[in-house]
Amino acid sequence: KFTCPLCDRSFTEKWAMNNHMKLHTGEKPYKCTWPTCHYSFLTASAMKDHYRTHTVFFYDNTVLHSKQTGNNNSYTAAIGQSTA
């Protein structure tokens, strides 16, 4: 069990407590890589969820078309995956 030293909230996983500590410090290390976007996030998964708002997808997460640039690989390039 991991307990936050600032608010006594407890977590069963160390990574969860580490993410929680970012709430206290204001740290948001995951920046959206979209060219005109300046949002930052506590977790990589939150950034990836946000990044999807910049693109349109097929049901299998293959990029169909970028909403703003027409770049079919903008999301997958940002997260390091191929569309194949």
Image (spheres, rainbow, N blue to C red):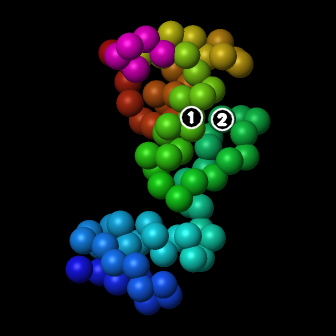
Residue 47, position as x, y percentages in the image? 53, 45
- Dot 2 alpha-carbon crowd within 10 angstroms: few under 14, some 14 to 19, many 20 or more: some
- Dot 1 alpha-carbon crowd within 10 angstroms: few under 14, some 14 to 19, many 20 or more: many
Q: Residue furthest bottom?
A: 5
Does dot 1 land on a helix, a strand or a loop? Answer: helix
Position of residue 11 in the picture relative to residue 64 (left or right): left
User: Which amino acid, mark 1?
Assistant: Tyr
Q: Is residue 69 magenta?
A: no
N-terminal-most mark, 2 or 1: 2
Which stretch did the figure color magenta?
57-61
Residue 10, position as x, y percentages in the image? 34, 78
Q: Main secondary structure of the magenta part?
A: loop
Q: Which disc, if any, is residue 38?
A: none
Q: Which disc, if any, is residue 34?
A: 2
Does dot 2 land on a helix, a strand or a loop? Answer: loop
Residue 40, position as x, y percentages in the image? 63, 52
User: Which amino acid, mark 2?
Assistant: Trp
The residue under the point 41% across, 85% down is 8
Residue 52 visible in the picture: yes
Discs 2/1, front: 1
Position of residue 67 in the picture relative to residue 41 (left or right): right
The residue under the point 66% across, 35% down is 34
Mark 2 touching mark 1, by CB under 8 A?
Answer: yes
- Find residue 82 and report its image quarter: top left
The residue under the point 46% across, 50% down is 44
- Find residue 33 and report its image quarter: top right
Q: Which residue is mark 1?
A: 51
